[in-house]
Image (cartoon, rainbow, N blue to C red):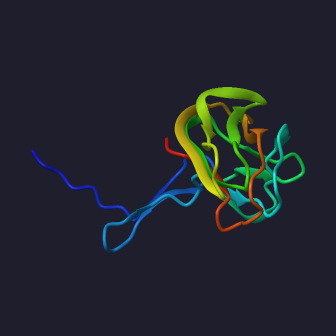
Amino acid sequence: MASILKVNTIQDATNSNTAMTVDSSGRVLKPVIPFGQASSNVKTTATNLVNLNSHVISGGGLTVDQSNNRMIVPVTGLYQIGFTELADIANYVEIVMRKNGSNISGGRSQTGTSHQYGGLGQNMLISLNANDYIDWYCVAGTTHNNTEYNNHYVYLIG
């Protein structure tokens, strides 16, 4: 026996917060998914955190903490995290993604040698608990101070 469930909105039982809507075209919208993105408009030099001071957007409870240059997640779940950076004129730049101040295995990217500018980036899926934070740390070299190239993001997948 086939059945059809017709709903426009799904809400939580406690506070009637909208968790999901379905529009007339069948698109499913989830308005409170945690996300954050920020870029840096200053050079990051070796042994410093990457600045998260420009083009900051966030929602769904995720906090972009610009004072400490980190993104703090509000709920436990599986997250997509990553970054792109432009390396300044140098012979080597290395950036590592960190969870709660510790390097994430596989969350590292570096440029080669002898370049005018070099792009580097990394992304990965990671399980995070509520109030965990992600930051980006420059191990070596210097990044370029251009917000068009330097972006860092975290968003909940599920």
Residue at the far right: name it: 67
Viewer-closest of 14 and 111:
111
Identity of the residue drawn at 56% across and 35% down: 77
Identity of the residue drawn at 77% across and 38% down: 140
Q: Position of residue 108 (x, y in %)?
A: 62, 35
Residue at the far front: name it: 114
Residue at the far bottom: name it: 24
Residue 49, compared with residue 87, is above or below; it is above
Identity of the residue drawn at 75% across and 53% down: 143
Q: Position of residue 91 (x, y in %)?
A: 70, 45
Residue 20, compared with residue 136, is above or below; it is below
For the question of whether residue 44 can be seen, the reply is yes
Q: Position of residue 23 (x, y in %)?
A: 38, 71
Identity of the residue drawn at 83% across and 47% down: 45
For the question of whether residue 35 can be seen, the reply is no
Looking at the rendered image, the quarter that the N terminus falls into is top left
Residue 153, compared with residue 140, is above or below; it is below
Residue at the far left: name it: 1
Q: Position of residue 51 (x, y in %)?
A: 81, 53
Q: Quadrant of residue 144?
A: bottom right
Viewer-closest of 11 and 123:
123
Task: Tell me if 68 is positioned left or right of 78 in this view.
Answer: right
Task: Tell me if 78 is positioned left or right of 61 in this view.
Answer: left
